């Protein structure tokens, strides 16, 4: 998703208490940053923060890390998080946001961090063959996640794209994830999960596009090749 440059974003992020500009320094010790041993969940490609802000404010016994590569997006996410916590009269103490290239994500997390969940919502489908390795659910990326995920850690994935969804099912299986649940029409599922509707999700539903979703469980450890 493209977004216009926002000159205020970088200064606001640098002044924010819950923005991390140097995530590589926290590899293996994110729990010391949160100052507790609560589970850590991460969102890859958090965009404007509509999903992670609502999720984090509703579950303050969980720690959250939201990652995106674009300052403008993270600036909007920062403001959205502040808005959600303020409206719920809660202190922002269980979430950090950071700017980082997800293709290098194993440089900022390790198994010592105890990441228990990864959320991926409406990522770029990269439909052209030569670009498919850039998909956040491609086997190349999943192998990187497995370097820091423990057995039993889960991934939650939503998309509007049929081809990406079907390919992703195969990607997960190839690298040792078990598909616990999957649906080709999330709106019709009453107890699939506690769903937080994203901006993209609402837009796609209004266009009559069905939302696909799955939960995958990491059942095989990463093996160095």
Image: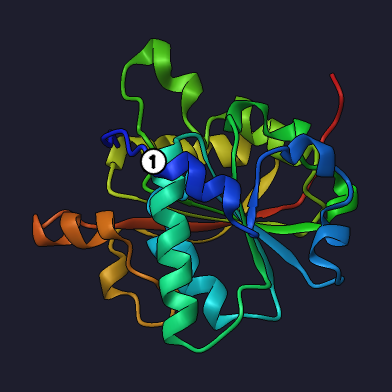
Q: Quadrant of residue 205?
A: bottom left
Picture residue at 46% right of the left edge, 81% below the top: 86
For the N terminus, the image quarter is top left
Quick one: quadrant of the C terminus?
top right
Residue 176 coordinates in the image, percent (x, y): 70, 41
Residue 166 at x, y = what percent? 39, 40
- Which of 115 and 208 lies nearest the eye of the viewer? 115
Could you tell me if residue 22 is visible in this image?
yes
Residue furthest to the bottom in view is 89
The total number of labels drawn is 1
Q: Residue furthest top?
A: 130
Badge 1 crowding class, 10 Å Cα cut-off, few under 14, some 14 to 19, many 20 or more, is: many
Out of 146 and 33, give the one closest to the viewer.
Answer: 33
Q: Is residue 194 visible?
A: no
Residue at position x 50%, y 78% from top? 85
Give whichever of 131, 44 is nearer the camera: 44
Q: Identify the element where label 1 is drawn.
A: helix
88 w.r.t. 135: above or below? below
Of all residues, the one furthest to the left in this rendering is: 207
Q: Badge 1 is on which residue?
A: 72
């Amino acid at each position: 998703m493209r977004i216009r440059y926002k000159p205020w974003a970088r200064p606001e992020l640098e002044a924010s208490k819950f923005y991390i500009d140097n995530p590589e320094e926290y590899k293996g010790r994110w729990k010391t940053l949160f100052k507790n041993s609560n589970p850590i969940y991460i969102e890859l490609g958090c965009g404007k923060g509509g999903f992670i802000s609502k999720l984090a404010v509703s579950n303050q016994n969980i720690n959250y890390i939201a990652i995106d590569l674009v300052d403008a997006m993270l600036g909007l996410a920062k403001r959205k998080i502040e808005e959600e916590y303020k409206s719920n009269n809660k202190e922002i103490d269980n979430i950090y946001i950071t700017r980082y290239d997800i293709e290098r994500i194993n440089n900022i997390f390790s198994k010592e961090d105890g990441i228990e969940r990864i959320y991926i919502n409406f990522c770029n489908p990269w439909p052209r063959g030569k670009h498919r390795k850039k998909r956040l659910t491609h086997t190349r990326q999943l192998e990187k996640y497995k370097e820091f995920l423990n057995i039993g850690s889960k991934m939650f994935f939503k998309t509007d794209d049929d081809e990406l969804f079907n390919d992703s099912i195969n990607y997960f299986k190839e690298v040792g994830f078990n598909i616990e649940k999957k649906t080709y029409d999330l709106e019709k599922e009453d107890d699939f999960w506690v769903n937080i509707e994203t901006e993209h999700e609402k837009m796609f539903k209004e266009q009559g596009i069905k939302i696909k979703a799955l939960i995958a469980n990491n059942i095989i450890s990463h093996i160095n090749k």
